[in-house]
Amino acid sequence: MDTSLQDRTAALQLRNRRIRFVLLAILVANWLVAGAKLVFGLVSQSAAVTADGLHSFIDGGSNVLGLVAMGVASRPADLDHPYGHGKFEALASLGIGAMIGIGMLELGRMALDSLMHDRHVEVTPAMAGVMALTLVINLVVTRVERHYGERYNSTLLLADASHTLSDVFVTLAVLASLGLVALGYPKADGVVALLVMVFVAWVAYGIIRQAVGILSDTARLDAAQVAQHTMAVPGVRSCRDVRSRGMEESVYVDLKIEVAPELTTAQAHEVADHVERALHAAYPQVVDVVVHVEPEHAEASARPSPHAS
């Protein structure tokens, strides 16, 4: 393993350790919030508050899933996984979406139960205070998690930040429902719980769509731009069949280039090395570049301009 690859591997392992630390801190915050909401929701028989507590509990569960997944994702490449274990992070994001979907069904059941039965929700200043405090905690958690998600280009942290942000809007809706219940509109509790369910479903859809994109090898880089960077390398006559895949922070690229047919094997290999360095410089998230070198064909001169396919 060359020095540059060793450095990138070490950096990736350090990143994964830091992500696990962030997830652990968020886990503690989420379950403190969830415990407070569930206790007050069950005591007051509020479907909306209990639903919000369940949503926060799912947040904590997703953090546990993320910690386990990141432990696997941080493993270096091996014979069975030559491209590394990074996709386990995407699998965890997919698991988060599935957990949200399961929680959504429970939210719907509780909301319908509240609307169909005469529930006397007891709204107290202590309940409102706890909900306001959890709102502040969730805002801080979302900001911190999104910051580190963008800093480390972590799909998992960004997905979990979106999930936690949904908790902020849910809590705002629940606070509004508590105000309406206190004003004499008891059905507001069930209506808000239903709105929470719809919002949670939308969040789950976004997270699952992102994870599926990664697992299905959606292109990570613009092929035309990659071809432009490649064509700027001296000795490259054409560039085609550009492909990219992987995670946001660890992208794999392969492409084909044509060089002058009179070049020796060593000279053609040197051009390929320059292409690799150029793409690593242009895209810091690229961890591996495979360049297929072919001799330029006689009819290549008739091409109007090289492009990526």
Image (cartoon, rainbow, N blue to C red):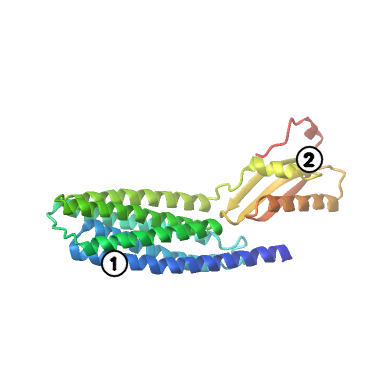
* Residue 228 horizontal/vertical position (percent): 70, 41
**Mark 2, residues whose alpha carbon is within 10 Å: few (<14), some, or many (≥20)?**
some
* Residue 34 horizontal/vertical position (percent): 32, 65
Where residue 1 sits, quadrant-wise, is bottom right
Tally the numbered discs. Answer: 2
> In this picture, is 277 found above or below 236?
below
Tell me the kind of residue under disc 2: Arg
* Residue 264 horizontal/vertical position (percent): 87, 49
Q: Earlier in the sequence, mark 2 or mark 1?
A: 1
In screen coordinates, is 167 left or right of 306?
left
Tell me the kind of residue under disc 1: Ala
Q: Is mark 2 in CB contact (under 8 Å) with mark 1? A: no
Query: Is any atom of residue 291 visible in this view?
Result: yes
Residue at (69% x, 42% y) in the render = 227
Q: Is mark 1 on a helix, strand or loop?
A: helix
Where residue 98 sits, quadrant-wise, is bottom left
Residue sitting at the far left:
118
Q: Estimate the spatial distance between the alpha carbons at disc 2 and disc 1, rounded to whole Å.
A: 65 Å
Q: Which of marks 2 and 1 is in front?
A: 1
Residue at (18% x, 59% y) in the render = 123
Q: In the rendered structure, find residue 157 and report the number of the disc placed on it.
A: none
Q: Name the residue under label 1.
A: 36
Residue at (13% x, 58% y) in the render = 120
Query: Is any atom of residue 41 visible in this view?
Result: no
The C terminus sits in image quarter? top right
In screen coordinates, is 223 left or right of 179?
right
Q: Mark 2 points at which residue?
A: 237
* Residue 82 horizontal/vertical position (percent): 62, 62
Q: What element carries label 2?
A: loop
**Mark 1, residues whose alpha carbon is within 10 Å: few (<14), some, or many (≥20)?**
some
